[in-house]
Image: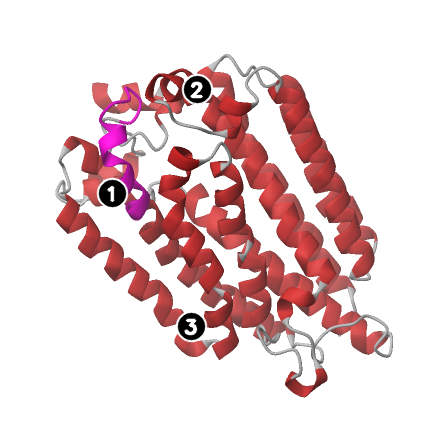
Amino acid sequence: MAQKRAHQGDPVSLYAGGDRPMWVDYVPASWRPFIQLTRINFAAPVLLVYFPHLYGVLQTAIVRRQNRNNGGAVDDDGGPVPLRDVLRVALLLLGGSFFYSMAAHAWDDIVDAPLDRLMARTRNRPVARGAVSVRAALVFTLAQALLAASFFLVLPRAAARCAVPSVVSCFYYPWAKRHTHLPQLVLGFCLAWGVMTGSASLGSTYGDNNHQGRRAVWEDAARLSLVLVCTLWTVIYDTIYASIDVPEDLRLGLMSTAVLFRHRLKPFLGVMLGGMGLCLAYCGAASGMGLWYFLFAVGGSFVPIGWMIYRVDLSSTTSCYRWFSRGFWLPGLAIMVGLGAELLATPG
């Protein structure tokens, strides 16, 4: 109980390896390191992967309804999609995101284990502390990746092709902080490309410009702007999270946007927020969105992120973690609600 209270009293221990909510105490002890390895003891890691996929599904469904109602005035690549099909694809992508998230986090811990042992905050992660061997972690990661890939068997073939850029960037991400000051940008692209995979899962074309006269999913400017939204959003909240480790990163020679802009971090975050807001607005205008989208998705995400940037104390690890978690949940849900409300308000 004392250990549990210590973990609950130290929110900065998220992803550190020793943290666990009460329900994990009812899981067999031999399973707990794998729960810590995959981060499924928290909902946020799965939703980090899932939200962009869901946004891609909802945006595509809205545009297809707009296209029919406006007599083709909104350029897209198919007819309207029944709501039941939207829900079916969204649920399938949630399942795939669950296993993809587990594989991605396990892979990250495998590659980072030598560095994790050198940092006070992360040395208790399962692979770093020896609770899970590298070999066992690799087998586990491969199993989760195969389970994630199995969902493509019941989705359009284009969805699997569309996922390749995300998988490649996910594979590279753990090394990014050794090579560039922009690992947050790599992570942002890895997660944000889920918008394209979500759209392709609803039947949008990918990699074939002439398929039935339709454009490839990545040629749609509104959809690309939504990818930029998710990329910049990730850069913002992960830069704040990375601020926790700036002293250790400097000691070990590791790089991040938090290290690169450490003397002017809030202005940098403000620029990222401005770009995110512009991209959200452009996506709405180009997709023919209405009031619900601009009220919830644009306003509902811009305001809390702006407030977070204003209030966060970047020199405090506790403040960085607290605002990092808020900076994810509120905007993520606001964009989801805005797109969902817009879909329901658009005649289909």
- Name the kind of residue labelled 3 in the image: Phe
> Dot 1: few (<14), some (14–19), or many (≥20) neighbours within 10 Å?
many
Given residues 74 and 86, the one toward you in this image is 74
Along the horizontal axis of the image, is 80 left or right of 315? right
Quarter occupied by residue 97? bottom left
Quarter occupied by residue 134? top left
Question: For the view shown, which residue lies furthest in the top direction?
Answer: 315
In space, the residues marked 2 and 3 are separated at their CA atoms by 39 Å
The label on residue 246 is 2
Mark 2, secondary structure of its residue:
helix
Q: Which residues are magenta?
A: 106-122
* Observer able to see residue 254: yes
Residue position marked by numbered label 3 in the rendering? 152
Residue at left offset 47%, top offset 64% = 163
Q: Position of residue 188 (x, y in %)?
A: 53, 44
Residue position marked by numbered label 1 in the rendering? 110
For the residues carrying marks 3 and 1, which lies nearer the camera in this image?
Answer: 1
Question: Is residue 89 rendered magenta in the image?
Answer: no
Along the horizontal axis of the image, is 291 left or right of 296? right
Given residues 150 and 295, the one toward you in this image is 150
Q: Position of residue 142 (x, y in %)?
A: 25, 59
Q: Position of residue 164 (x, y in %)?
A: 45, 64
Query: Upstream in the sequence, badge 3 or badge 1?
Result: 1
Along the horizontal axis of the image, is 282 left or right of 192? right
